[in-house]
Image (cartoon, coloured by chain):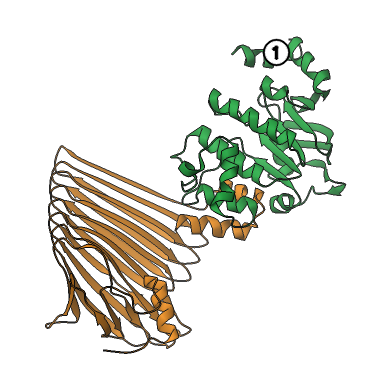
Chain colours: A orange, B green
Amino acid sequence: MDKKLNNIEKFILKKISDIDDFPSGAFNIRENGSGIKRHTTENVNIVSKTDKQGIDIIVKEGTKNETIHIPVILTKGGLTDIVYNDFYIGKNAEVTIIAGCGIHNDSCETSEHDGIHRFFLEEGAKVKYIEKHYGQGEGTGKRILNPQTIIDLKDGSSLEMETVQIKGVDNSIRQTFGNLAKDTNLVINEKIMTHGAQFAKTEFDVVLNGENASTHVTSRSVAKDASKQEFISKVSGNTKCYGHVECDAIIMDNATVKAIPEILANNIDARLIHEAAIGKIAGEQMVKLMTLGLSEKEAENEIINGFLK
Amino acid sequence: MLELKNICFNRDGKQILDNISFAIDDNKFIVITGPNGGGKSTLAKIIMGIEKPDSGLVLLNGEDITNLSITERANKGIGFAFQQPVKFKGITVYDLINLSLGKKVKFSEACKYLSAVGLCPRDYMKREVNASLSGGELKRIEIATVVARKSGLTIFDEPEAGIDLWSFSNLIDVFSDMKDEISGSIMIISHQERILNIADNIILISNGKIKESGTRDEVLPKLLNNTKTCKFLKEDING
């Protein structure tokens, strides 16, 4: 489990976790189906599962300001990597977790990574979870990513999730499930850009079970060329709670985007909102940037980059 | 110098601009005024290239720019402040100032453009140029982005529209400062007497035609006194 990273590995790591070498703090780097390096700290333990592929990440009660990196790299074609990672976050711990998967596939065979991440937050815990997905490579083999995130929030805990898929992923089905207890907060920010013939499907299912639980889900996506996107969101409110889902998509060329909202209030004090907007880039935004001297293409890029920032 | 020659513009069977010709000399401050629906904004858009005239010529420093794109005109030194500032998602005030300047500048450098329009840079620089900003804030940011470009000709389409009186007072200072430090021409479309008061020249456009044109001293008294030719202005002032 000890090796040096080559340039492709470093590049992909940079893309998905903003690091280009082994980070300080706790981490576990997985490549082509097996762990290549791991580091634990006094407060963060990482243990391999014995019954299936994956790890348990255990954060001690009261841990503050630690960052945990758990990136996955796939550089071989013809590999389907299914991994189960469970995060146990102790009472009042506050940590940042940076995950994500980068595929470099130069072969003509499909590379697939299905990461199933479960989060168990004890009372008062706070987690910022950043997950980036990226694909590259010259081969005709498809790059497939199917991340699944299951979030269980105990009283007074909160999780903020940032999920980004900007380029190179041919097919993805992203599922996120949330179960929220009293006084909890779940914020999800999703950014997706698809191009070519790519397909990306996102499914959120959040259940607000505890009083004063709240969730805010924001999805911003850009669909180019002949790509297809689907956004399904379900928020159920079973008590006095607040849920807000925003889906905002820019559609270009011959792409298609479908948004399916579902909000279910099972209690008179549940306040649930869903907003969905799909449209092309506003002409007036293009005109404004062109009056500042940008070409049509430059204006389009700035608008998209800003939208997905 | 900008010259318009015989500009005509029709839409839906209505003559919006009817054979408009005038010139804006270098370093001049021109105010175009006239009743709503008289064709002023269309004229400004034709100069910027946002609309194309049905006939006539737009010349900039002797070069025919009638068929040039918005981008080409911007790069030749025409700036344009929208009557309704455009909102974006994700683009911050700092981003927009950098885009206006055509390069990424230090935060401190970008700050001066916001300070000039009476906005505290610390509060606004990182904010998105979106609907969370008030009409007056958006307007001032719009003006800051245009002032930053230091264009040879800067056009402001009704800068007073949609802003409160306090903001308006600040805007007059911005225009006065621009006039004092002028490095090009300014053309403002406005109904406001306080803006007319700082103009070098005033052009009155009504029903798509130039009704009056001349220096401020020549035109302003007629606008303010002649109820027959200028009923709209009296209404604006009284209203």
Residue B186 vertical position relative to residue A42 in the rendered view, above or below: above
Closest to the observer, A263 or A43:
A43
**Mark 1 = which residue?**
B231
What x and y, as percent, mark residue A166? 43, 67
Dot 1: chain letter: B
Closest to the observer, A298 or B54:
A298
Can I make out residue A15 in this image? Answer: yes
For the point 22% across and 69% down, which residue is it? A117
Left-right relation of A214 to A167: left
What x and y, as percent, mark residue A228? 41, 65
Residue B234 vertical position relative to residue A231 in the rendered view, above or below: above
Q: Quadrant of the N terminus of chain B?
A: top right
For the point 46% across and 38% down, which residue is it? B133
Element under disc 1: helix
Left-right relation of B238 to A138: right
Closest to the observer, B92 or B72:
B92
For the point 48% across and 71% down, which residue is it? A196
Can I make out residue A170 in this image? Answer: no
